[in-house]
Amino acid sequence: MGESGILPTAFAADAMEPLAVAEHLAQENRSRSMRRCYLVCYDIREPKRLRRTHKLMKAYGEAWQYSVFYCTLKPIDRVRLENDLREVVNLNVDQVLIVDLGGNEEAAREAATTLGPGLPDQEGGIVVI
């Protein structure tokens, strides 16, 4: 400390760096807690739209079955997903069901019961779109 009791500038900058890291981590935790889990199921009547829908869904989540996807999304990504689906599907004949499973990813995964082969292993990390 200097004679005035104030930290020299070099020390103050070093002291702020961990604070900036802590703020970044707090923001990241808030972002994660804002994510919600969704089960997206679809029934698409035409093969070309079906392939396009499947390709689109692979960008947002993991396939649990061919037409059933598990997604963990921030609110803005949930809106983007719905808008992207509206561009691909024919709303007069196709159907998409989006089920909100809540914000607890572990509980959402544990709530699923499968008969036959199990669900695919969880992919590590978070996919950023």
Image: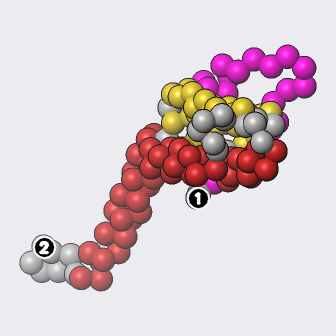
> Helix, strand, or loop for circle 2?
loop
Q: Is residue 114 left or right of residue 112?
A: right
| Residue farthest front in this picture | 92
Residue 80: percent from left, percent from top: 51, 51
Identify residue type, mark 2.
Gly
Q: Residue drawn 24% across and 82% down?
A: 9
Instruction: Identify the residue under disc 1.
Output: 129
Say whether marks 1 and 2 touch (CB < 8 Å). no
> Helix, strand, or loop for circle 1?
loop
Residue 40: percent from left, percent from top: 64, 34
Residue 127: percent from left, percent from top: 63, 54
| Residue farthest right in this picture | 117
State the extent of the magenta-drawn residues as a range. Answer: 106-127
- Depth order, front residue of 59/52: 52
As for residue 109 lying within the magenta part, the answer is: yes
User: Height in image: 41 above or below 17?
Assistant: above
Identify residue type, mark 1.
Ile
Residue 77: percent from left, percent from top: 51, 49
Q: Residue drawn 61% across and 26% down?
A: 108
Looking at the rendered structure, which numbered label has been put on residue 36? none
Quarter in which the C terminus is drawn = bottom right
- Depth order, front residue of 5/94: 94
- Depth order, front residue of 29/96: 96
Instruction: Identify the residue under disc 2.
Output: 5
Which is more foreground, mark 1 or mark 2? 1
